[in-house]
């Protein structure tokens, strides 16, 4: 419920409107999981709230800790469904990797999450609560608050557009967690219409695109939905994004043996990067059970790095975290 709805409810009950402000603060700033926790509200009012409402908070069902410090949460939702979220620590920051769907709407062949059918979208509060849970773990285990959020968990965020943006609005609001939108990145496999919509709404958070090939036939073979949203449409949407936001684009890119480890593939990527300011994160591949996709050789990754740098494109080779607990990129699949 919005703050105004809560205020109206109390007025209808013959109480003061400011009670709605108090409840709203308990729900969002203090993340109360029960009405009993709302200690500045009378017991009678708390009992009345209990009769009228329920707080559908998440529950961390299982927490696993990696040898590298990464934490993976199996998060149980109010209807019994489970998603996973990850806390990724470094020496200077802690990042929350949060989910936006139970399962996924898309069909990337290299991703374990894509093999789960999409059961439903997460609500804004369920996304928000994942962030709160990870912030609490960051403070408990690393003695510092959460510093960054990436929407790179289970699901395609832009296929749950309204709920994801509502969650980010709450996360960045002074009445919520008060985090800077500059510390948030939404990662998409590329839904052109929704990228344009974000640009029109002048969002302040960052955009990452899970690209993996700048050659249509190759990309369609590993990400079949590319047949519906081809690179031409994606490029047009990203050009529009940059024109509206002046925010550079991050491309997430895995190099696989025998798929995109050729000079032709790198040259196509360079060309794709040129139309708007961008940077490339080359991500280590994290195998899923059938072994169909294999990490490319170090020589192939080095070729990418050299050619991109020679063309003035910022490139970072990222090592995956949390592989030993299936918490790395592409591995979230509710195995437990």
Image (tube, grey):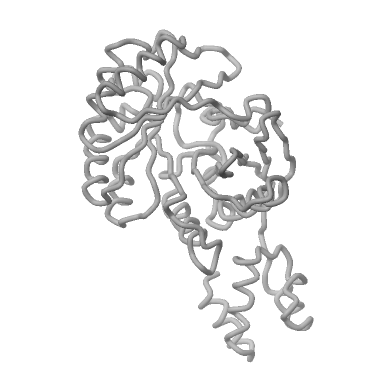
334 shown above or below 247: above
Residue 276 occupies which quadrant of the picture? top left
Residue at x 26%, y 28% (from the top left corner): 312
Residue with the most extreme front position: 91
Instruction: Give residue 164's position: percent from left, percent from top.
Output: 47, 52
State left or right for residue 225 relative to residue 232. Answer: right
Residue 102 vertical placement versus 51 (above, below)? above
Q: Position of residue 196 (x, y in %)?
A: 28, 47
Which quadrant does the N terminus fall into? bottom right
In this view, the residue in front, 220 or 168, is 168
Is the C terminus in the top left, top right, bottom left or bottom right quadrant?
top right
- State left or right for residue 291 relative to residue 316: right
Would you say residue 78 is visible in this rendering?
no
Q: Pick the residue in front: 145 or 37.
A: 145
| Position in image of residue 254 (x %, y %) | 43, 22
Determine the residue positioned at 57% across, 77% down: 6
Residue 288 quadrant:
top right
Residue 249 % position (x, y): 33, 39
The answer to whether one can see residue 102 in this image is: yes
Q: Residue at x 37, y 35 (%)?
A: 209
Left or right: residue 330 compared with residue 158: right
**Residue 206 vertical placement versus 300 (above, below):** below
Q: Which residue is nearer to you in this view: 120 or 242?
A: 242
């Amino acid at each position: 419920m919005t703050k105004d709805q809560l205020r109206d409810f109390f007025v209808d009950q013959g109480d003061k409107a400011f009670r709605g402000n108090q409840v709203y603060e308990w729900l969002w700033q203090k993340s109360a999981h029960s009405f009993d926790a709302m200690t500045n509200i009378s017991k009678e009012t708390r009992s009345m709230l209990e009769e009228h409402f329920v707080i559908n908070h998440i529950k961390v069902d299982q927490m696993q800790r990696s040898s590298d410090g990464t934490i993976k949460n199996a998060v149980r939702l109010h209807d019994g469904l489970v998603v996973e979220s990850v806390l990724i620590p470094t020496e200077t920051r802690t990042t929350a990797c949060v989910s936006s769907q139970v399962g996924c709407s898309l069909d990337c062949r290299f991703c374990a999450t894509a093999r789960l059918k999409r059961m439903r979208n997460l609500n804004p509060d369920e996304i928000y609560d994942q962030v709160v849970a990870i912030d609490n773990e960051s403070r408990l285990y690393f003695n510092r608050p959460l510093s960054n959020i990436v929407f790179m968990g289970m699901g395609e965020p832009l296929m749950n557009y309204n709920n994801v943006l509502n969650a980010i609005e709450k996360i960045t609001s002074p009445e919520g967690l008060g985090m800077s939108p500059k510390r948030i990145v939404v990662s998409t496999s590329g839904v052109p219409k929704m990228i344009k919509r974000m640009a029109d709404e002048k969002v302040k958070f960052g955009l990452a695109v899970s690209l993996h090939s700048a050659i249509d036939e190759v990309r369609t073979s590993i990400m079949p939905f590319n047949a519906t949203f081809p690179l031409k449409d994606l490029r047009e949407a990203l050009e529009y994004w940059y024109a509206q936001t002046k925010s550079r684009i991050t491309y997430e890119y895995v190099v696989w043996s025998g798929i995109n480890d050729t000079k032709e593939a790198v040259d196509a990527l360079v060309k794709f990067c040129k139309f708007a300011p961008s940077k490339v994160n080359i991500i280590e591949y994290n195998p899923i059970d059938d072994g169909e996709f294999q990490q490319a050789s170090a020589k192939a990754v080095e070729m990418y790095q050299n050619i991109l740098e020679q063309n003035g494109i910022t490139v970072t080779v990222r090592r995956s975290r949390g592989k030993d607990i299936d918490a790395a990129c592409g591995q979230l699949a509710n195995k437990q």
